[in-house]
Image (cartoon, coloured by chain):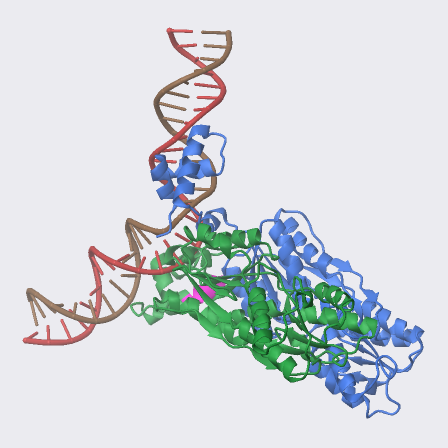
Chain colours: A blue, B green, C brown, D red
Amino acid sequence: MTVSLKDVAQKAGVSVATASRALADHPRISEATKQRVRQAAAELGYMPSAIARSLVKQETRTLGVVTTTVTDPYAAELVRAVEDAAGAAGYTLLLLTSHNLPRREVAAIRALQERRVDGIIVISPRGVEHYPDILAHVTVPLVLVNHTLDHPRVRSVMADNRQGARLAVEYLVDLGYRRVAFIGGPTTSRSARERLHGYTEALRAMELPLDSRLMFPGQGRAEDGRRALLAMLDITPPPDAVLCYNDLTAYGILAQAWALGVRVPDDLAVIGFDNIPFSELTAPPLTTVAQPTEAMGHTAVALLLRWRRGEAVDTVHFDCTLVERATA
Amino acid sequence: MTVSLKDVAQKAGVSVATASRALADHPRISEATKQRVRQAAAELGYMPSAIARSLVKQETRTLGVVTTTVTDPYAAELVRAVEDAAGAAGYTLLLLTSHNLPRREVAAIRALQERRVDGIIVISPRGVEHYPDILAHVTVPLVLVNHTLDHPRVRSVMADNRQGARLAVEYLVDLGYRRVAFIGGPTTSRSARERLHGYTEALRAMELPLDSRLMFPGQGRAEDGRRALLAMLDITPPPDAVLCYNDLTAYGILAQAWALGVRVPDDLAVIGFDNIPFSELTAPPLTTVAQPTEAMGHTAVALLLRWRRGEAVDTVHFDCTLVERATA
DNA sequence: AAGCTTTGTGCAATCGTTTGCGCAACTTCG
DNA sequence: CGAAGTTGCGCAAACGATTGCACAAAGCTT
């Protein structure tokens, strides 16, 4: 069916070994032979089998990526950065999604290992508590983005979520807001916990009271923002500002506020988290905390690649920055 | 390093062949042996090599996907649908992006073929004019989403872009708008040409004049919308409504309109295309034309899988629908 | 008890590459 | 002119699975 090296060799009148070396531009093959082999390969439309090559070389030049879902703009941004960096290094991406389910995440890691990827990147892991079990047998290096795990075969790329949340709260308080609410993210998400931590920490540092009625649960969906805004209006006095787990949640607030005639930021200041590409396009554009996703994605694959080469690599941390726009 | 079937066989005291059959639950292997082999495999943490299996089985259970970029919400939505359908059928995705460059797209198809994927899905193809060359040697079935090509190894999943654009224009005209502008997409994109076609067709059908000054170029970016709005204001009389190539472009308009104090839809009605998840979250929510992305993604995978099974498959068409919200 | 079927297992080929090693033929050099 | 080195190529063994075929042992039939 598909043409193999054997066919090329035959057509060029050489052995398979010679054909292989000719195409690899091996120095011990005469220029004349190389020409003939290349010619034959071109005429037959030969495409080497990466499968067979992987088997003998014991490397697939493929990186596994598991993410929650590509429809999350933040995750998509990271996937893009990872794909760019990987592509530049000649690697291809095998993509699996967990849909926020720890079980699926673990299954994905297993599937990637069976496919013998050269490294795995997990974006916003959801099931690290199960990792020790599978890691006992998984031999491929793992890089976690937005989580850490103390294990010899695991490294991390982290954004300092606590610092980012602190930044946002301090900014709000500096602007004069006093009753700052917080809408949280999935409890399985480490960054959600850290952002909450940064929020409480900042309030304490600025000697403002910590009011548990001002802390709302959420899953990082727009829906959570909508619901939270409704709940907020029942509180007296209501909060005058809110920090959201992510931009999507913030947009839930904004959409509901628009529907209800609540003015932003006059009645309520809103700050998001992640600086998704969209956040500068909305009316009003969203004030939000940004992570250096580009750098984080590149770093994740750089870690993996250097690690493979035998270099010692270490977990990397990045700072968040505040992007001042029009909702606070 | 990694444990192979040989190790499992050894530990269980059987041949490699028997071990293989035991794990595959072959009927001619005794229950006792199966137990022993499974036990050994579990203890050693054996993970079968998909690479080796692919080589002999001549199938990889992997689908190749090439898309422009995952950060485009519309593309992301399709990728998600494809991933869902593929995953449900036990297939994994190899993802490559073209960044809208025909060269990269063709290179991606080649790379996927070398990796011997069982089928390739190209989302919004950009370089079909080069396909005939590579298709001469590519033997894997191809499914194009949003483009067609008459070739025995190519099928398509199409949304009726012309009909969608017509729908939008008719809606605007019914609402009383008379000077309807259009912002186009990349000229390499087939859907862009079709949407333009639908736009002109509708105007002609409704006996409205076709004014070339009301047709703006674009690349599907927010930037294009911003620029177009600026240009529109120089025209007298200015357009009172605009149909955009996609939602991103529409948001460019909205952002610029907000900055300039142009009221939407009072001063200018805006309709987008694609119904990205975000479009219902903005203030105001965007009126837009929707494609059944979920169904399209599933269909793309289904086509490929049925095709592999030897069934005859044919290109599938889907209708667009108008999602009425608050910008028109 | 001989023949036939069923059951359980192993041998060895195969998939398509890469690569260590051997071996001619040809060069070079003392 | 013989020894040593160089150049160019092929043989065959991996890599890690699957699978057709052979075959021995056991069970069943008559």
Above or below, A201 against A65 in this view is below
Q: Is residue B42 magenta?
A: yes
Judged left or right of residue B122, residue A239 is right
The range drawn in magenta is B38-47
> Can residue B121 be seen from the camera position used here?
yes
Residue A50 in the image: above or below residue A35: below
Q: Position of residue B313 (x, y in %)?
A: 38, 69
State the image coordinates of residue A126 (x, y, percent, origin top left).
64, 71
Q: Main secondary structure of the magenta part?
A: helix
Q: Based on the displayed image, in which of its 4 quarters is residue B282 positioned? A: bottom right
Quarter occupied by residue B254: bottom right
Measured along the vertical axis of the image, is residue A28 above or below residue B35? Answer: above
Front in this rendered view, residue B150 or A228: B150
Pick the front one: B197 or B1: B197
Position of A33 compared to B262: left or right? left
Where is residue B42? Give x, y as percent.
47, 66
- Residue A113: where, in percent of width, then height? 53, 60
Q: Quadrant of residue B223?
A: bottom right
Image quadrant occupied by the C terminus of chain A: bottom right
Q: Residue at x 40, y 61 (%)?
A: B12
Instruction: Count numbered badges in the picture.
Output: 0
| Horizontal relation, residue A123 to residue B238: left or right | left
Q: Does the stretch in magenta take in B304? A: no
Query: Does residue B89 appear in the picture of this structure?
Result: no
Q: Residue at x 67, y 57 (%)?
A: A300
